[in-house]
Image (tube, coloured by chain):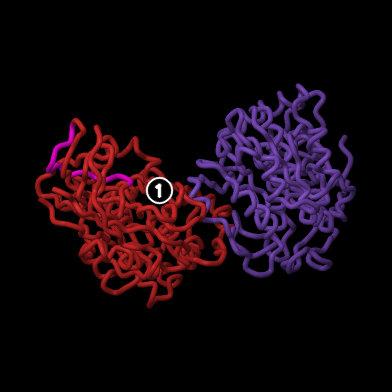
Chain colours: A purple, B red
Amino acid sequence: MERINKTWILRRRPEGEVSDGDLELVEGPVRALEEGEVCLRTLYLSLDPTNRIWMSDREQYMPPVAIGDPMRGGGIAVVEESRFDGLEPGDIVNTGLGQWSLYQVKPGKEVNKLPVLPGVPLTAYMGPIGMTGMTAYCGLMYIGQPKPGETVVVSAAAGAVGSMVGQIAKIQGCRVVGIAGSDEKCEWLTKTAGFDAAINYKKEDVGAALDKHCPDGIDINFENVGGEIMDEVILRLNDFARMPLCGLISSYNATEPVPGPYNFSMLLMRHVTLKGFIVTDFMEHFAEGRQAMASWLLEGKLKFATDVVEGLENAPTSLERLFTGKNLGKLVVKVSDAP
Amino acid sequence: MERINKTWILRRRPEGEVSDGDLELVEGPVRALEEGEVCLRTLYLSLDPTNRIWMSDREQYMPPVAIGDPMRGGGIAVVEESRFDGLEPGDIVNTGLGQWSLYQVKPGKEVNKLPVLPGVPLTAYMGPIGMTGMTAYCGLMYIGQPKPGETVVVSAAAGAVGSMVGQIAKIQGCRVVGIAGSDEKCEWLTKTAGFDAAINYKKEDVGAALDKHCPDGIDINFENVGGEIMDEVILRLNDFARMPLCGLISSYNATEPVPGPYNFSMLLMRHVTLKGFIVTDFMEHFAEGRQAMASWLLEGKLKFATDVVEGLENAPTSLERLFTGKNLGKLVVKVSDAP
């Protein structure tokens, strides 16, 4: 059976937001497997801020996607064909550093077979027990070092990472305040996810709201956003506060230099520890983190939301949802049906 | 014998640089001692950036000096009279949080008798084996965590803290590049203090000079200054770099909000650990630090310079030397003669 692939190719670097013509969806046959390779059919693509970063030729964790190359991205896939010992057709895998395509041929050793946990949907492997869950768990536990009674503020709180950070912090006995961009999200955070308070930054004075909801100051700022909101949070940090620096999404579309926080000197005056990280810095803790998250998930202590967009053809335009604050929970693109 | 005191009183908060009328030198009798108190005669005042911070009603480590109160400052003094067990006339002490005055009456338990080390001048107790030395030692060793072969950049490198940081880093086997504000200082850094390179930021393109002198990037940025120079350093940080944030002197005289580093996102992308601190965060390491610094000093491995201004009356105007880059080494005011 010949498989016809669809692949998003990066044609030029976006200026600001991704726009028509930056990427092109091309069709073509899938090549035959060599020894040690597998052919995967994508079930879900995980859309993350890092996808946007990879499109730009700026300072970042790894080289950007080259012009003319398939767009890079992770997700969940099913093995269609295998010439690799240890993976069989029908196995569900994490694609690792995969592509925005329907099919992809990869060395079998670069993909990880997912454990099957009864009662856990596939999308959880991109959420609580996937990379975003590990980002939240490791960043909060190992940089944030939460202690019972402390106050934790998290920005992009209704996002895939932020929503997990807040719930893990609650489990650790902290007071948790989330910052998000709609009343619907804020209601989800307080009613469903159990946050103590949520601030709608599009409607409220963030500084005044932080004063109200953080009467004892802020001990941990789990930072996903940057910009003016981060400045308001930094201004209220307590002595010896910790600041896991996970993302600065407000600047990823920027076309001009972005000033750092005007309250930068508070990092000095308040003896703050700030640590920039990505999830792979904490690989040694993944087994422990997955186990903790899976347990909490099965015990009903972790709620997670998934924002599912249908169809590979909608991947580039859907990415924008992360930057305009449209997504609630983990943003994924459903590419094809699970077996 | 009645002692006539001279004390600098803070009359108003400076706008920008300290100017005439912000402080006033007043004379008056020294009061009689109560049980447990000592009367100290100041030998040297230590002038530090924090003196300027204490004059302003801004976010800081401790409350600012109140208008009408004596100006706060540390230094070295001799005990003139004692009603405290354990201190006797003639003892040389560290005044702790003392005053800008000729005499001061303090509880004996708030001052520390200095050990007498043969061959070590009194000014060293405000330098290498004093608070500035401990700031350099603890910030570099416990936040910077230098490893042999790494590259360390230090700003305000010819200052009391910076000059020690660079020399300790050399002892640890690092490549050390200092940034300072005159050819004289740069020459002192490379010829006397043994730095590998020094950059005169008033004459050189700091970015280009860093590229030249740090071919393998920067592993530790010991930050004393802030502003544009910090931005150039941050841009060149390596993965997992450390950034002891010790001072931001470029902003202490600011009268308008100062933007944080434009390259703030590098702290994320390069997995940087930044930690704001003051020396008292590391009190548990002072005994070890003093011992190490005293040994290196007596072995001739640490050079230190002292910028001595004569006369208490010159304290306010001398403070400016720290902000205009005039001082080489530890800035002190000699107030009276040692016994």
| Residue B89 is one of the magenta-drawn residues | yes
For residue B186, say whether it is visible: yes
Which one is in front, B277 or A224?
A: B277
Q: Quadrant of the C terminus of chain A?
A: top right
What residue did someone put label 1 on?
A: B144
Q: Residue at x 13, y 52 (%)?
A: B338
Q: Residue at x 71, y 23 (%)?
A: A295
Which one is in front, A8 or A56?
A: A56
Image x and y of residue B31, in percent: 25, 45
Which one is in front, A144 or A263?
A: A263
Q: Secondary structure at mark 1?
A: helix
Circle 1: residue type: Gly
Check the residue under mark 1 and report the chain it is in: B
Q: Residue furthest bottom?
A: B203
Q: How many marks?
A: 1
Task: Report whether B36 appears left or right of B271.
Answer: left
Query: Residue A88 sits in which quadrant?
Result: top right
